[in-house]
Amino acid sequence: MINKVVSGAEEAIQDISDGTTIMLGGFGLCGIPENCINALVEKNVKDLTCISNNAGVDDFGIGLMLKKRQVKKMISSYVGENAEFERQLLSGELEVDLIPQGTLATRCLAAGYGMPAIFTPAGVGTEVAEGKEIRNFNGKDYLMEYAFDADFAIVKAWRGDTAGNLIFRSTSRNFNPVMAMAGKITIAEVEELVEAGELDPDYIHTPGIYVHRIFQGKDYEKRIEQRTLRKKND
Amino acid sequence: MAFTKEEIAQRIAKEIKDGYYVNLGIGIPTLVANYIPKGIDVVLQSENGLLGMGPFPFEGEEDADLINAGKQTITTLPGSSIFDSAMSFGMIRAQKVDLTILGAMEVSENGDIANWKIPGKMVKGMGGAMDLVASAKNIIVAMQHINKAGESKLLPKCTLPLTGVKCIKKIVTELAVLDVLPEGGFKLLERAPGVSVEFIQQSTAGKLIIEGEIPEMKLD
């Protein structure tokens, strides 16, 4: 087996330089690559284009990179939880491409499946469609959207092995498997790294061929954005 | 008396049928889960990658890895399944989800919806709303009929950036239940208890179609 293991986040991201396009997995703060985000903040790379469903919150996740003005452009579907993001966007400091969530996911999928473009009905007749090719199939209009072209994809998994195979846990799976497929170089941080052979091949979500670097992360905070509870007598 | 948000949710819940897979949006639509009629089997889809969304967890049982599309902690149920975001929108696009319930800031008389952006003010993004409205075969909108200034949000034409075109078929507001007709126009079906047809007429800027007696909404 090809060994994909690196020492940690610092080594994993060492060749991510200014002006790079990176994908970051996660939905809200769920399943985000916390270790690599912290390492990118520490390294202080600039002018990044970030493809991620959300933009973190003011003091966690991608929000930390926004605060240090490391991000030139965000490509996201929903950014409502981040006041600093909204401020930079409305003032024109940050370039933002808001795209439908399904389009975002499927443009990742297309990249990982070797398909140059997809057709989706999402956004037809709206400002999302401006300047895009429209094709009619069976009486319905579809927008052509291109596969993403990202230098790096950074994902977070629950378990991984030294061959780069990944298993995700619960809804922290979200964008991680499709982004893992879509990066020219894919970095995976995992909560538990095991030897090749310890994971059942039938239960692998992302095959190691898509993963170039893997390491066991540490000190996961796994912050909850909306802690919502039910009372005992409900 | 105009309906409360809970009552709007309760009325919408009556539209849910046995065997439905349902996607609930953020806000009033989320409340619909509390009023699903007893004795029917319904599976809730959360577009971040879950079928079979259960209730909120008890204190101490919350799991940071298990959230819904509103980022709230939730639980699974027997028969739940987890998948990635591409598959989640795949099943939406392929119309495997029977019913989508979502909120709106404006709806026009030809079924256009606007709910994601107020230029220069609110920039949150569309999330999954554009995918949902472009693909769902059956969409119910839960919304306020009029804003605080009394201005109608059911319009001849939307003023805000659109989320989708000609896709809304049914609306439940604090004042009324209405169908959006394929040829255009809001057809008044029911009114909230004590709300007059005249008040609904004056609260609806788009074309309102009134035929015969309009019954009051019933919740049970």
Image (tube, grey):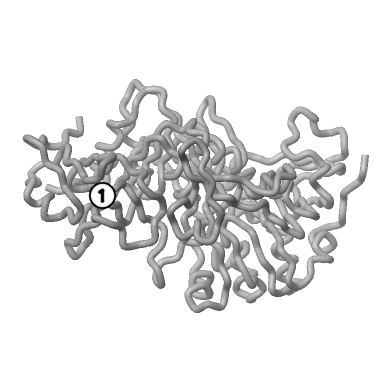
Kind of residue at disc 1: Glu
The answer to whether residue B72 of the structure is visible from this angle is no
Tag 1's secondary structure?
loop
- Horizontal placement of A69 versus B137: left or right? right
User: Residue B178, percent across and down?
Assistant: 22, 41
User: Residue B25, percent across and down?
Assistant: 41, 45
User: Residue B28, percent across and down?
Assistant: 33, 47
Judging depth in this view, the residue of B161 and A180 nearest the camera is B161
The C terminus of chain B - image quarter: top left
Residue found at x 34% / y 21% = B39
- Horizontal placement of B58 versus A168: left or right? left
For the view shown, which residue lies furthest in the top direction?
B39
Task: Write down the quadrant of residue B134 in the picture.
Answer: top left
Residue found at x 41% / y 23% = B19
Q: Chain of mark 1?
A: B
* Total marks placed: 1
Residue found at x 85% / y 62% = A11
Judging depth in this view, the residue of A205 and A125 nearest the camera is A125
- Horizontal placement of A57 versus A42: left or right? left
In the displayed structure, B70 sits above or below B125; it is above
In the displayed structure, B51 sits above or below A141; it is above
Residue ID for mark 1? B109
The answer to whether residue B8 of the structure is visible from this angle is yes
User: Residue B14, percent across and down?
Assistant: 27, 31
